[in-house]
């Protein structure tokens, strides 16, 4: 059994490492914004397709901090508390906000009532998993498909009711 021994000179290894690093840096530095015919935007590392334009992004800085703690503030900058809203953000007076909240509550309650009515009708039609067969359902597979679809509709309606109740609970 023969062993094949490859020997590389230190210069060759250095050249190989530099060329690999150079290609990685090159790949990271080019970003293209591509927009297809439907207007969907996508960022790519190649711009060889139609509708792609090169974008310049600020350099990425990666730092390692211990265990997800806040990064230390830069020297020469005073640490100030973050504002909850920007200073130029439009403000609404309390009366207007209360009216909007009441409108939102009313809309959610109306949606909840209609969703509950829909669920009631779906359950009545579902008939505990044995709905009446329709004239076009002589094929049992069609009937089973409709029953499965009804079950999904009931589940979706129940989830909608839960979500609406959560929203109503979260209102002030």
Image: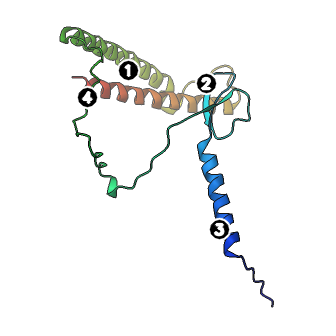
Reading the chain from its start, which is encountered first: label 4 or label 3?
3
Residue at 45 percent across and 19 percent down: it is 121
Q: Is residue 5 above or below residue 119?
A: below
All told, the count of numbered labels is 4
**Mark 3 neighbour density, 10 Å: few (under 14) some (14–19) many (20 or more):** few
Reading the chain from its start, which is encountered first: label 3 or label 2?
3
Judged left or right of residue 140, residue 102 is left
Reading the chain from its start, which is encountered first: label 2 or label 1?
1
Quarter of the image with the N terminus in it: bottom right
| Residue on which disc 4 sits | 84
Judged left or right of residue 72, residue 21 is right
| Residue on which disc 1 sits | 116
Front-lying residue, 100 or 132: 100
**Mark 4 neighbour density, 10 Å: few (under 14) some (14–19) many (20 or more):** few
| Residue on which disc 2 sits | 133
Reading the chain from its start, which is encountered first: label 2 or label 4?
4
The label nearer to you, 4 versus 1, is 4
The label nearer to you, 3 versus 1, is 3
Q: CA distance from mark 3 to mark 1?
A: 71 Å
User: Looking at the image, do the residues carrying marks 2 and 4 touch, with CB atoms under 8 Å apart?
Assistant: no
Determine the secondary structure under disc 1: helix
| Residue on which disc 3 sits | 14
The label nearer to you, 3 versus 2, is 3
């Amino acid at each position: 059994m023969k062993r094949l021994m490859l020997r590389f000179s230190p210069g060759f290894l250095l050249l190989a490492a530099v060329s690999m690093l150079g290609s990685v840096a090159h790949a990271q530095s080019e970003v293209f914004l591509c927009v297809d015919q439907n207007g969907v935007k996508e960022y790519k590392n190649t711009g060889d397709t139609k509708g792609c334009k090169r974008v310049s992004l600020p350099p990425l800085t990666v730092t390692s901090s211990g265990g997800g703690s806040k990064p230390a503030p830069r020297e020469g900058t005073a640490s100030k508390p973050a504002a909850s809203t920007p200073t130029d953000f439009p403000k609404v007076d309390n009366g207007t906000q209360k009216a909007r909240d009441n409108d939102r509550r009313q809309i959610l309650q109306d949606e909840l009532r209609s969703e509950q009515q829909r669920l009631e009708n779906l359950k009545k039609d579902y008939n505990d998993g044995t709905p009446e067969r329709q004239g076009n359902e002589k094929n049992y597979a069609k009937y089973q498909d409709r029953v499965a679809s009804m079950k999904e509709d009931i589940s979706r309606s129940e989830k909608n009711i839960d979500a609406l109740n959560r929203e109503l609970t979260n209102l002030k």
